[in-house]
Amino acid sequence: MLAAPNGGTIVNVSSVLGQLCPAGLADYSTSKAGLSALHRTLEAELRASGDDEKVKMILVEPGQVATPLFASVKTPNKFFAPVLEPVHVAQEIVSAIEEGRGGVIRLPAYATMVNWYAVLPAGLQRIARFLSGVDHAVAQTSSQKSYDEPKAAKTE
């Protein structure tokens, strides 16, 4: 990309769950947090080398996307945390690339406020988690999968 006349764009698709870390999704949240950290590190290296104008970096951190991975998760509040269609997220990414923008894409609206969550006192974080239902929605899905697995094994 550095040798290309027009440069290029690196897109990393992470998740707000890399910052929210709901109960029951340690593996998913950890990998997404790691990807977001890698993105920020690469972005800093490009900036330090002076190549940040040539190679754009886009970090995508959406909320729940309507994919098979989270099909069984019931969103606690569809108004504040609507489930995103993959095509909508893809359109935002393509738009940013075509416009030559770098930066962070967070969808829907609540995702833009996730960084503020990290600076809240622990007590307020617990209240926010309770009100959002994030831990309950995922934990319910995890226990449902565990419950359904033995049934699936018996029917084979």
Image (spheres, grey):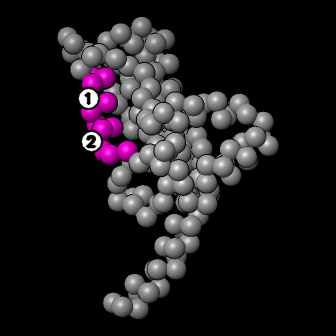
Is residue 151 placed above or below 48 in the rendered structure? below
Mark 1 or mark 2, earlier in chain = 2
**Secondary structure of the magenta portion, mostly?**
helix
Asked if the stretch drawn in magenta spans residue 87, the answer is yes
Judge by depth and name the residue closer to the eye, 25 or 8: 25
Q: Can you give x and y, in whole percent of width and height, for residue 141 in the image?
A: 51, 66
Q: Residue at x 50, y 26 (%)?
A: 40
Residue under pointer 2: 87
The magenta span reads 84-97
Q: Amino acid at mark 1?
A: Val
Is residue 147 placed above or below 124 in the rendered structure? below
**Is disc 1 placed on a helix, strand or loop?**
helix
Q: Can you give x and y, in whole percent of width and height, for residue 21 in the image?
A: 60, 48
Is residue 92 placed above or below 43 in the rendered structure? below
Residue under pointer 1: 94
Is residue 93 placed above or below 2 in the rendered structure? below
Label 2: few (<14), some (14–19) or many (≥20) C-alpha neighbours in 10 Å:
few
Q: Residue at x 44, y 26 (%)?
A: 104
Q: Residue at x 48, y 73 (%)?
A: 145
Judge by depth and name the residue closer to the eye, 136 or 101: 136
Horizontal arrangement in the rendering, residue 81 relative to residue 154 (left or right): right
Quadrant, the N terminus: top left
The answer, for residue 72, to whether it is visible in the render is yes
Which is more foreground, mark 1 or mark 2? 2
Q: Can you give x and y, in whole percent of width and height, for residue 18 in the image?
A: 54, 43
Label 1: few (<14), some (14–19) or many (≥20) C-alpha neighbours in 10 Å:
few
